[in-house]
Amino acid sequence: MDTGRSRRRVRRWSAIGAGAALAGSLVALTTALPAEGHGWRAKATLRDTSGARIGTVRFEGDRHGTEVKVTVDGVSVGPDTFHGLHIHANDGKAACDASTGFMNVGGHWNPTEKDHGLHRGDLPSVLIQADGSGRAESVTGRFRPGALAGRAVILHAGPDNLANIPNRYAAGDPPVAGPDADTKKTGDSGGRVACGIIVVD
């Protein structure tokens, strides 16, 4: 029996086995590391002007972008209607101040300075039922977790038209040329009825 050849064969297979184990470990490591924006969570608790908790907005990152889940109950303004929902800049990272009508959290989060409907913080409206409850889910690729921390979510009193006024309305009587400055800024969604500060997990 050639013991030298056997020892060389054992060493060769040991090296191959170690290499395979290392490769397997690297694969496991790379698959365990989340892609940018994947696997993170954030949450805002919505409170109305009286301080009552009326719902939550949850953000969950996945490979498609960010899933936004809205759950509200006990909304007393305009039941059975759509209500605008936006992330507001809150650059000063203040708490929601009901005494200011939540105006202290600033305007829509719009770092790219686009018209309304294309703001980074524009979200689909929430349809509030007659009993004051509402649910909404959407997915967006407009933001990642680091930029959300400390910003504010605002639920508005009325529907959001997303500044969508077709040019054909210009032929009306009286003519409407298109969205004015206020519409481009806010979507005419009315007052601020609830506010919550976003906390990233």
Image (cartoon, helix red, strand yellow):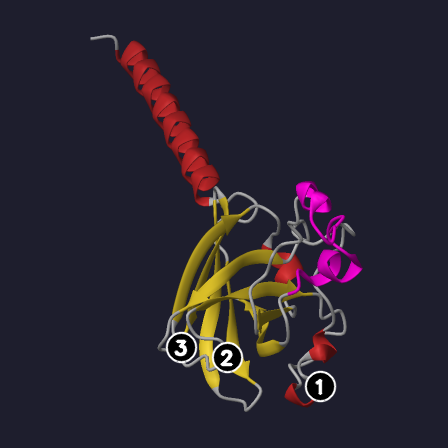
Give the mark toward the camera: 2 or 1: 2
Q: Give the image quarter of residue 181.
A: bottom right
Q: Secondary structure at mark 3?
A: loop
User: Mark 2 sits on what residue?
Assistant: 77
Q: What span is colored magenta in the figure?
A: 167-188
Could you tell me which secondary element the residue under label 2 belongs to?
loop
Q: CA distance from mark 2 to mark 1?
A: 18 Å
Q: Nearer the viewer, residue 93 or 88?
A: 88
Q: Circle 3 is placed at which residue position?
A: 132
Residue 100 numbered mark, or none: 1
Crowding near pointer 3: few (<14 within 10 Å), some, many (20+)?
Answer: some
Which residue is drawn at the image coordinates 38% and 70% (left, top)? Answer: 129
Residue 126 position, x and y percent, is: 47, 63
Q: Nearer the viewer, residue 89 or 84?
A: 84
Q: Are marks 3 and 2 in contact (CB under 8 Å)?
A: no
- Report the quarter where the N terminus lies: top left
* Of the pair 7 and 144, the residue shown nearer to us: 144
Q: Are marks 2 and 1 in contact (CB under 8 Å)?
A: no
Q: Amino acid at mark 1?
A: Thr
> How crowded is the residue under tag 1: few (<14 C-alpha within 10 Å), some, or many (20+)?
few
Q: Earlier in the sequence, mark 3 or mark 2?
A: 2
